[in-house]
Image (cartoon, coloured by chain):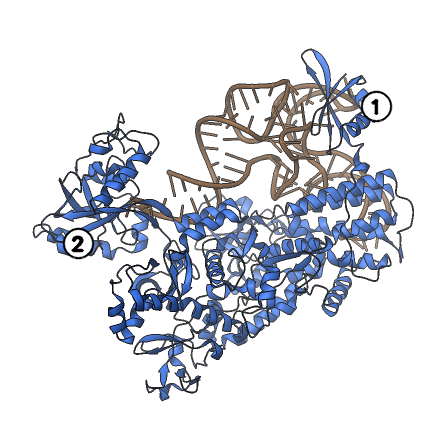
Amino acid sequence: MMYNFNEIEAKWQKYWAEQQTFKAENNSTKPKYYVLDMFPYPSGAGLHVGHPLGYIASDIYARYKRHKGFNVLHPQGYDSFGLPAEQYAIQTGQHPAITTEANIKTYRRQLDQMGFSFDWSREVRTSSPEYYKWTQWIFIQLFNSWYNNSLDKAESIGALVDVFSQEGNSNIDAVCDDAIPVFTADEWNSFSSDRQQQLLLQYRLTYLAETEVNWCPELGTVLANDEIVNGVSERGGYPVTRKKMTQWSMRISAYAERLLQGLQTIDWTDALKESQRNWIGKSVGATVVFDLKDHASTIEVFTTRPDTIFGVSFMTLAPEHELVNQITSLAQKPAVDAYVLATAKRSERERMADVKTISGVFTGAYAEHPFTKKPVPVWIGDYVLAGYGTGAVMAVPCGDQRDYDFAKHFNIEIPNIFEGVDISTEAFTDKGTTVIANSDFLTGLEYKEASKQAIDALEAKNHGVGKINYRLRDAVFSRQRYWGEPFPVYYINGLPQMIASEHLPISLPEVEKYLPTEEGEPPLGRAEVWAWDTTLNAVVENDKIDHKTIFPLELNTMPGWAGSSWYFNRYMDAHNSNELASTEALNYWKEVDLYIGGSEHATGHLLYARFWQKFLFDLGVVPVDEFAKKLINQGMILGMSAFVGRVEGTNTFISADKITTESIQWIHADVSFVNASDELDVSAFKSWREEFKNAEFISENESHFKVKREVEKMSKSKYNVVNPDDIVSDYGADSLRLYEMFLGPLEQYKPWNTSGITGVHNFLKKLWKLYVSENRSKVTSAVATKDHLKTLNKTIKKVTEDIENFSFNTSVSTFMIAVNELTAQGCTSKTILEPLLVLIAPYAPHIAEELWEQLGHKESITTAEFPEFDASHLVESVKAYPISFNGKMRFTLELSLDLSKEEIEAAVMGNEKTLAQLEGRVPKKVIVVPGKIVNIVG
RNA sequence: GCUGAAGUGGUGGAAUUGGUAGACACGUUGGACUUAAAAUCCAAUGUCCAUUAGGACGUACGGGUUCAAGUCCCGUCUUCAGUACCA
């Protein structure tokens, strides 16, 4: 009997599905373990070999944990709302739900054929109304909450209204808009209902506000900051401009500090935590208020260096700053206007690209230094950003390089306030322990103390206050798109109203086209049945809107990250129609124990999901405030693109090793035309495209036309995609799983190279041959020899450590060595071969199941216990290094185990022969050092 | 610029707390089997000299610590990823 992987794999996949082998129960006497993958967006292209990398790793871990006696939850679903399905719908008119459904079918088939141990009974899809009902529900809860700084948690808006009606808002410490006026209880009670609602909106955790947003005209929608890369849209690479729009926003800034602190409690990589810290961007400092000479208004700045306040020699406002117009003197007006206009013309991108050029204009106005009362000239300059802090800085040229460069460029005074520091060529930016000089009451102090005293003095004069500033901005939550969650919102007098939770979900309406309307409204503006009837509590036709009982519904939809910010909780109780998930289920599974996914979600999904989890925790809905204990970022599998060189302007191709001229145009060739020696199948290439049909090919000889190889991201447009379907049908899923692990460390980026797969495939064939010969099982009840036990236990030890450390690549090598050794040893012993199968099962589950069955087991191998390693079989593995030390011969002896002193001595004595061979001497005395190193005096 | 990670054969990569560097695999070369090919099996494969037995040099580069350094320390260079006039 041959190793017929196709047959075996189909058989066991069917068995697992029928037996529901991987169905997790929401209670068990076993300890729980939750292994989660980032769920995929089901794209039309299907999976390529790079996609399953993380799924294979998590599957190995999930299977391992089951063998170790855990009740494992390992679910999978689809992040099925998103732009590509909608773009496709715009082009073809096909409803996104239909394409999405078709794509999911493909995904499911591809995932199934790889033998993943997902519990599909818990599948979720963000685009299904049963699911987004709860996304809408969470939105309503956010709307009905505000952030109470005193308690440092979210609270119900009802509690806030109670306080307002009893004592006004002066004692409320909330995260809210800065511009909220102070009002008393009497004032509050006398406000109209609309006015009250407007005020409350400014406290809510999700609120409507006219904000400057990142508008992408090509995509016809706004984008969040993390959806923009280098000034263009992450998806599609289209230009992005600034635009004012009324949008829903999420007050994630309320959670900035907790999001930062929470990082200390979770086991995520340092790189990823660092990304999130940068994104949150906490800076501790102070706001300082400068009075203006000859003007009533004041300039407020934020600084992290209040200790340097006596070094201020000018101020700089962002060109967009609202005061610029008011304070500019008549003489300076033309210059200032010209500068403001020039800056406005420059795109965000140009401004970012050009950070070297120093530019700015004097406004003609002077501020007054809060302590010295000296006049401080006010400039504008584009190195100050309107969006950060207050959009204005107090410039301390001796302590900040940008201020320094600006001062030098415009010949502004650079006073030195640092004791014994030379600032003739550059600013001194080190906080360190340098002493402040020439600074009145701060003179002689170091940074820390000086900052504190400066802030105290500013607060005493009412000229500033200690402040912590965060870079994290509130997240825009509206998208002008069709294929997303509809908001459960209708409008009365332009004020948003929530639809009561019992009427959810509000399902997406049908539209005849997926484009914005002629009036520029989002696609939902085309829906005919899209109005809310407050008496029927139902969605009704638009033309019935009477603004008395029937009102317009929100036309925006939610962004892609809405559904993915809480899905891990839904898997715990995926079909609950009364709750997001039952309390019992949430309390049982609590959080994800291991989360595997790409690092590209560092500042998007992973930050938003932590935000929502903390909010749901404040609400008492979920029992933990961090959703994932441990997170691993799998690297990407890259494609090996092939390029053929064509002489520019001709149809003549030259073999890559023959190229001498420089005017070569490199054209992507499909990687399937290229063999392992980088040689092109010329005839296949010729018939690939009409334009190549009559092309001329120059090479040493016809069969040796070389291509140029380059590692790139796998993508259809680069013709370097390798389809897992082909690999599975040629080598089997077990080979693919092993090979993806074998390629290299999980976290690393590495190129795919199909030719290497024969190595692991041969291993599986050898494994098969170790158990099966002709038509019979070779496994006997023979007693295991010392060698057999050594090989087995070595393997158990290594593989267990590897899995615990997520170094799956090296266990594949360990398996190969084990099988080679056991084959050479002629091992047929069941006591060895049975546990060996369990070791391999998480990696190559199909072949393990098949051989397990041949050993006479009726139950699936998934119920088998993971073998425990027995150190006693490894005692003899000793390495010895002779060394000369202090003129005496000494041996250093290493054992590959932690053993007791007695065991080491026994091992050493048993190895006298080895040592004697090495140095011609026999050790006389053994010095045992704690750990594994042993010194032996020869 | 800052932050994080990393530089090991022709290639992907091993190497525990400092302990025989290059495991394992691909590729290459030679051989066996075969009419032939595929498949399979065996052998060789860091570099240089000796071509037997051995020797020298080797983990980006330059120093250092140590009986012993890919691993630790100092300096330099390079690559990748993230982020950036953040006051």
In the rendered structure, which amino acid carries the disc numbered 1?
Lys
Chain A, hue in figure: blue
Chain B, hue in figure: brown
The C terminus of chain A lies in quadrant: top right
- Check disc 2 and report the residue beneath it: A324
In the rendered structure, which amino acid carries the disc numbered 2?
Val
Side (left or right) of A172 relative to A141: left
Q: Is residue A355 above or below residue A439?
A: below
Residue at the farthest top position: A887
Which residue is drawn at the image coordinates 64% and 45% (left, top)? A805
Which residue is drawn at the image coordinates 27% and 69% (left, top)? A188
Badge 2: chain ID: A
- Check disc 1 and report the residue beneath it: A913
Q: Secondary structure at mark 1?
A: helix
Residue A156's x, y, as percent?
41, 66
Residue B11's x, y, as percent?
61, 42
Which residue is drawn at the image coordinates 7% and 50% (left, top)? A331
Q: Residues within 10 Å of mark 2 (few under 14, many from 20)?
A: many
